[in-house]
Amino acid sequence: MVRALLLVVVCVSAVGVAGLAVSADSMSEKARKLHFSSIVLDTHDDTTQRFLDGKFDLGVRSGSGSIDIPRMKEGGLGAIFFSIWIPSKITGPEAVNRALVQIDAVREQVRKHSNELVLATSAAEIREARKQGKIAALMGVEGGHMIHSNLGVLRSYAALGVRYMTLTHTGNTEWADASTDKAMHNGLTDFGKDVVREMNRLGVIVDISHVSDKTFYDALEVSKAPLFASHSACRAICAAPRNMTDQMMKDLAAKGGVVQINYHVGFLSQEFRDAEKGNPELDKARSADLVKLCGDNEGCQIIEGERITREYVEQGKLPRVEFGKIIEHIDHAVKVAGIEHVGLGSDFDGANMPYGMEDASKLPKITEALLQKGYSEDDVRKILGENTLRVMTEVERISRELNAGK
């Protein structure tokens, strides 16, 4: 999730765009058939913040944001992890209470739209939802600060259907270091390692997006189950500290994990990071506008932030990035980690999307672009969702074994 950053859009390189044009109707038809016969699984969406606004109806096509049921159907999105998120600065009982409110909001959306959605907590339930013609709704807690250093709270979240937890968000927790904060613990504390072990037992996936490099390696060593990065990209292309290095991706893959590529321009493009550092006044102006428009309403800030950024682009104040940058990161991750270890974690409704990937209805373009780059149909299916389903299945198996005392 990206809120504090300046949401600037930058130009994509020619390399990122080359080969993405539709060359023939047959290719488009092939992509369409492949995409809509696959389970497309997105591991990170921040639409939950909009659920807290009584005016938002997930069942109605919205003129803003990236996610609603009509556009999910149009884009063939078959399974979605809704993020449970609270800023890192909010801790203690308040963080727990606010997390519970968001968990309830997701469950309530499923209840209201039971003809289109079903709550899923396992790979098998995602596949069953597919057979029923429904979209599987899942949940991930984005930040370990929301457990209030209490394993009982973690167990409560799991019982309510949460199936992954990001160990940190942008700030350190009392037991883990984040990638964008000053190190306090040299990775995971002893309690942090207990958190990972309990997540393994509960069948909750250990998510290492946002964590420091040392926290990543500590979690990788402690966990008996595969880990994933629910919404990260490649540091070799864009040097954001919460992106993964090539070595980290190799090590994640060696333990069976998956890196799900984030679509936010600030994690896709080095040019973005350079522009951010070079124009701090623009960030201040944008932040001031958001406060005037939204106050502390996070759902409003997400939507208005993207609108303001698009205005900057249209006015020529900022350049733009195209969706081909997503393909560049996917392709790099595949080359480094292997085809079995890459997936999709958009950050829809929580970040600034590149042009051509404004919302869930655009997802078939990823399938088409990968086919045009020479990926086989089987390999495309893996990236779209099968790799993540494999991780879920393995995490579930290890949970059963741990609970059986094996």
Image (cartoon, helix red, strand yellow):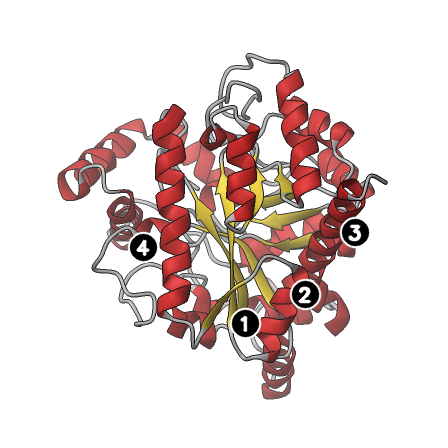
Question: Which element type, helix, strand or loop, lies under badge 3?
Answer: loop
Q: Nearer the viewer, mark 2 or mark 4?
A: 2
Residue highlighted by disc 2: 124
Residue type of the residue flagged with mark 3: Gly
Residue 221: image tag:
none
Residue at screen point 49% across, 39% down? 142
Residue 350 can be seen in this image:
no
**Local crowd size for mark 2, using a 10 Å CA cut-off: few (<14), some (14–19), many (≥20):** few
**Local crowd size for mark 3, using a 10 Å CA cut-off: few (<14), some (14–19), many (≥20):** some
- Residue 382 is left or right of residue 121, and the answer is right
- Residue 167 is left or right of residue 302, and the answer is right
Residue highlighted by disc 3: 338
Residue type of the residue flagged with mark 4: Phe
**Local crowd size for mark 1, using a 10 Å CA cut-off: few (<14), some (14–19), many (≥20):** many
Q: Are marks 2 and 1 in contact (CB under 8 Å)?
A: no
Q: Are marks 3 and 4 in contact (CB under 8 Å)?
A: no
- Residue 25 position in % (x across, y down): 58, 87
Quadrant of the snapshot with the N terminus? top left
Residue type of the residue flagged with mark 2: Ala
Residue type of the residue flagged with mark 1: Pro
Alpha carbon of mark 4 to alpha carbon of mark 1: how far? 26 Å
Residue highlighted by disc 4: 51
Alpha carbon of mark 3 to alpha carbon of mark 2: how far? 24 Å
Quadrant position of residue 290: top left
* Label 2 or label 1, whichever comes before in sequence order: 2
Which one is nearer the viewer's eye here, 399 or 91?
Answer: 399
Residue 148 can be seen in this image:
yes
Residue highlighted by disc 1: 364
* Label 3 or label 2, whichever comes before in sequence order: 2
- Residue 259 position in % (x across, y down): 66, 46
* Label 3 or label 4, whichever comes before in sequence order: 4
